[in-house]
Amino acid sequence: MDGEKKIRLLDLRTGEIASFVKELGMPEYRAKQIMGRLLLGDDIGDMTSLSKADREKISSVAVSGIPEIVLVRQSKLDETAKFLFKLDDGVLVEAVLMKYSYGYSVCVSSQAGCRMGCRFCASSGIAFSRNLTPGEILGQIVAVNKYKDIKIGHVVIMGIGEPLDNYDNIVKFLRLVTSPEGLNISARKVSLSTCGIVPNIRRLAEENIPLTLSVSLHNPFDSERSEIMPVNKIYPLDELFKACRDYVKTTGRRVTFEYSLISGVNDSKRHAEELARRLSHMQCHVNLIPVNKVKGTGFERPDRTSIERFAGYLEEKGVPATVRRELGRDISAACGQLRKSMTDEAGNPAVIHDGNPGNA
Ligand code: SAH
């Protein structure tokens, strides 16, 4: 059986691992042990509570699915680190580790490349190759935990890809992350960011996973938003806001709106006022992000005074807003900057790293 056809254990819930080992003639209770070791980032060969024969039997039909770390870039300014992973079929994706006062948070990728085409985002410049499986998304967290010997407490799905364009895998990933048999991270400590795929925002509201929904807004006018975010042509603002209001109603959770400020594009008083008008009476929060530089886009961030003025307009109208603090500035670890900086023109890792923390 070749590598690609093998089962990826990290894609499975404990019950599914139980059926799998049973089929191989092993007792079902092994499933819990296997899951425990997988979540520690161990490969099948390291699972010494299993006999050598059992490990071999499992390895002949399955792989652990822990992604290989091929490059780590550590910020010199703060504890931010960017990880480049190689998946089973050689596909490359990135994750970012951040340290906050409340603990470690990891930003994971949900797809290899992105189909959404947002004009300000580096991930739009990567050809879409495929969706990531639940285990490939989970594996990014597990691998970072093991590499740094830490315990990640918060997860943000804001890396490469559009999570709601990979719906079923994302929902299974969320269950693996939040369930007690999985990583047992509270859903309240998980944020999912979407450019606004309305039908799947509605489906997500019904999943009973109390995560924080972040919606990438970036412009309160349909015609202007469509220019920078093609998704708006399919799901325009009225539909998007209606889905967000319904999301708040169904889940009792407030929605966060991401607004990347771009000088001369969406940072005027006119924009702030329309944004406030659109958001009035909604339980929400606005995250203002000075746009991060991405080569070839020509977009620049406004100066400090303009950013504060924009935040001030929103506050005057009673819309809670914060300007996001930047981490990992020296390693292009910020929103919209993932993947390209770590790879050369052909998409290969710029520097191969052996995954040893001592060499990070
Ligand atoms: N596809 C999802 C998640 C990935 S992007 C989404 O669109 O939400 C994560 C966040 O970074 C989004 O809010 C996105 O709009 C924002 N972003 C992308 N490029 C950016 C840039 N150059 N500067 C600032 N924010 C950016």
Image: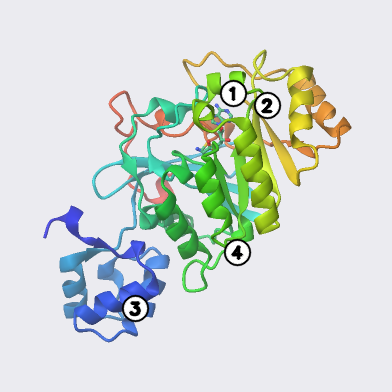
Amino acid at circle 3: Ala
For mark 4, what is the residue?
186
Mark positioned earlier in the residue sequence (1 or 3): 3
For mark 3, what is the residue?
31
Q: Which mark is residue 220?
A: 2
Q: Residue at x 26, y 74 (%)?
A: 20
Contact (CB < 8 A) between labels 1 and 4? no
Q: Residues within 10 Å of mark 2 (few under 14, many from 20)?
A: many
Mark positioned earlier in the residue sequence (2 or 4): 4
Q: Quadrant of residue 251?
A: bottom right
Task: Kindly report which numbered mark, 2 or 4, lies closer to the viewer in this rendering.
Answer: 2
Q: Residue at x 43, y 45 (%)?
A: 110
Amino acid at circle 2: Pro
Callout 4: helix, strand or loop? loop
Callout 1: helix, strand or loop? helix
Amino acid at circle 4: Ser
Q: Specify whether tag 1 is near ligand 1 (CB below 8 Å).
A: no
Q: Which mark is residue 225?
A: 1
Q: Quadrant of the C terminus?
A: top left
Q: Quadrant of residue 154?
A: bottom right
Question: Would residue 140 be visible to someone looking at this image?
Answer: no
Task: Kindly report which numbered mark, 1 or 3, lies closer to the viewer in this rendering.
Answer: 1
Q: Measured from the top left, where is residue 55 in percent x and y? A: 21, 74
